Image (spheres, rainbow, N blue to C red):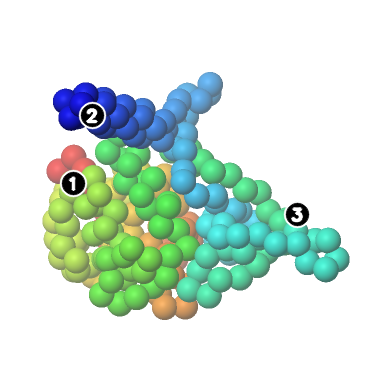
Amino acid sequence: MIKRFLLLLAALICLMSFTAYADEEKFYEETEDGQIKINLDCTLVSNPNYERPYYRLLSSYTDENGEEWYVVGGQTDFAMKAADCTAQDYYCVDTSDETRLRIVKNALERNGSKYRFGSTGHDAYDCSGFVYSCMSTVGISVPHSSYGICRIGRQIPIDTLQPGDVTGRGGHVGIYIGNGLFIHALNENEGVVIDSLSHYNTLNHFDHYINVVDS
C-alpha cells in the first residue's frame, strides 16, 4: 500500500511539473506578421488622454450612471473611463531572445507597483531595486545601485537598444521594453511606470545604455 502510494505521488509530481513547464512555455508566441507577443499575467490599459502609454489594470467598476471605469495602478491608484481605453493582456516586442522576453515580461507585470526607497519588491521598488529584481529572476546579477549598474555590462549606442537592455545615468535606471518605450520605478508620486524614451530624454537625459544580457 505504501509503495503504491509513493508511486502515485511520484506520478502526480511529474504531472504537476510537466503542467507547470507547459504553462511556462506559453508565455510568448509568434504572430502571423512575425512579431513576438508576450502573454502577460496582467492587463495593460492604454488611453490617449493620459500621459503614459500603458497603465496596469487593477480592477473595474460600474458607476451609478452605468458607466464602466478602470482602476489602474500607480503610487496613487486612479480611475479612467473604460470607453476611452484599450485593454490588452499581451505586449509585442522585436526580439525572439527568451532571456530578453522574460526580462520584459517580468518588468511589465510590475507596472503600476509602488515606489519605496531601498526596496526590491515584491510590491514596491526603487529604481535600481526594480532593475535588480527583474534581472535576478532570469539569473542576471546587477548591483542594487544606479551608479553600480551604470558601471557594469557592455555600453551600447542608444540606436542599438534591444528589449531587456538597461537605460540609465548616475541616479536613475530603467529597462528598455522595445517600441521606443522603457519602464522604471520613477518616484514616490508615480511608482513604476512605462515612459517614452525619446520624451524622457528631452527632460532627464540618460547617458548610459547597457547590455547586461549578452555582455
Q: Nearer the viewer, residue 187 or 121?
A: 121
Residue receiving disc 3: 83
Q: Which quadrant of the view contains residue 72?
A: bottom right
Which quarter of the rendering shows the C terminus? top left
Which quarter of the rendering shows the N terminus? top left
Q: Which quadrant of the view contains residue 131?
A: bottom left
For marks 1 and 2, the one nearer the N-term is: 2
The answer to whether residue 25 is seen in the rendering is: no
Which residue is most to the front?
Answer: 1
Residue 169, image x, y percentages: 26, 66
Q: Which quadrant of the view contains residue 22?
A: top left
Q: Is residue 188 left or right of residue 99?
A: right
* Vertical placement of residue 13 versus 41, above or below: above
Residue receiving disc 2: 5
Q: Is residue 64 left or right of residue 90?
A: right
Q: Nearer the viewer, residue 125 or 9?
A: 9
Q: Nearer the viewer, residue 96 or 108?
A: 108
* Vertical placement of residue 209 versus 207, above or below: above
**Marks 3 and 2, how far apart in space?**
55 Å
Q: Which mark is residue 139?
A: 1
Which residue corresponds to the image point at 33% horizontal and 60% vertical from the top-left? 174
In the image, what residue type sits under mark 3? Ala
In the image, what residue type sits under mark 1? Gly
Q: Secondary structure at mark 1?
A: loop
Q: Is residue 113 left or right of residue 166?
A: right
Which residue corresponds to the image point at 65% horizontal and 67% vertical from the top-left? 79
Q: Secondary structure at mark 3?
A: helix
Mark closer to the observer (1, 2): 2
Category of crowding for the residue at label 3, using alpha-carbon neighbours closer than 10 angstroms: few (below 14), some (14–19), many (at least 20): few
